[in-house]
Image: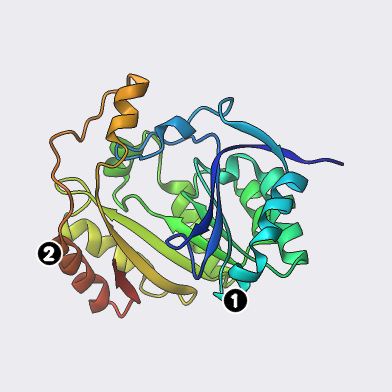
Amino acid sequence: MTVKGRIHSVESCGTVDGPGIRFVIFTQGCPLRCQYCHNPDSWKPSDGQEITVDELMKEIIKYKSYINFSGGGITASGGEPLMQPVFIKELFRRCQEAKIHTALDTSGFASFEAAQSVLEYTDLVLLDIKSFDPKTYLDLTGVSNEPTLRLAKYLNEIQKPMWIRYVLVPNLTDDPGMIEALANFLKDFTNIEKIELLPFHKMGEYKWEELGYEYLLRDTPAGTREDIEKAATIFKKYNLPVETN
């Protein structure tokens, strides 16, 4: 059976979405409406390009030597890849069959059963936790953070390697108490390889304007190195493996 999916774009030699050089697939469709999203053109599931797993694998295999030599692999990002679990599961299965490392970059907001099916063929999860505070998360994304936190707990239960990604947005997600609550939640997890602290940027603002969307963070300053270091200090207090980019 030919398995098809819809993608926004690909990046053949990515270096920021998992270890090593990675072939990154940005899937189409996302249930979140993050205020700082840099790919709002990936939101609508019906947009993008339809592609088969076979077609993708032909492209991925071209880069296999570079990928494996660097300790890299492929990363399914988005959008939200778990909106297309059958497609991502088959893609990851084929990659593992070809001895290519697989990483899932997800918000965790998806059917728990769908996530489980994909995790069977996932080597690493990059879990984006937008905020630990339920109200802030809802204001920021338009959805609840409960599915994300449930998935985080499950990943620890099954000892699936995980990177936590946290974007520091001034006056929105940089509150020390909020960060401390997240660190306290994660402190006993034993599957976390690193916590990536990412500074807020406005690289996607022009896309919002082109699409006719209101960009609510227009007057929000970019994140600073000082912001990152302050947040890192809190995670380090809980002996968590934090990385500052």
Direction from residue 108 to residue 167 in the image, left or right? left
Amino acid type assigned to the residue bearing label 1 in the image? Phe
Name the disc covering residue 226, or none.
2
Of mark 1 and mark 2, the one earlier in the sequence is: 1
From the viewer's perspective, tell me whether residue 128 is left or right of residue 236.
right
- The residue type indicated by label 2 comes to Glu
What residue sits 27% from the left and 23% below the top?
214
Q: Nearer the viewer, mark 1 or mark 2?
A: 1
How many discs appear? 2
Q: Looking at the rendering, which quadrant does residue 1 occupy?
A: top right
Label 1 vs label 2: CA separation? 35 Å
Residue 194 is drawn in which quadrant? bottom left
Circle 2 packing at 10 Å, graded few (<14), some (14-19), many (20+), is few
Say which residue appears at 76% left-offset and 66% top-offset. 98
Q: Position of residue 113 (x, y in %)?
A: 66, 48
Q: Which residue lies furthest to the right in this view?
A: 1
Q: Residue furthest top?
A: 212
Image side of residue 15 versus residue 234, left or right: right
Q: Nearer the viewer, residue 101 or 49?
A: 49
Q: Position of residue 119 (x, y in %)?
A: 64, 59
Judge whether 208 appears above or below 223 on screen: above
* Image disc number at residue 207: none
Residue count near mark 1 (Cα–Cα under 10 Å), binned few <14, some 14–19, many ≥20: few
The kind of secondary structure element at disc 2 is helix
Give the answer, above or below, for where 204 lies relative to 132.
above
- Residue at 45 percent across and 63 percent down: it is 15
In the rendered image, residue 209, in percent from the top left (x then y), is placed at 29, 24
Q: In this view, does 98 lie to the left or right of 45?
A: right
Q: Position of residue 154 (x, y in %)?
A: 55, 62
- For the C terminus, the image quarter is bottom left
Q: Mark 1 points at which residue?
A: 69
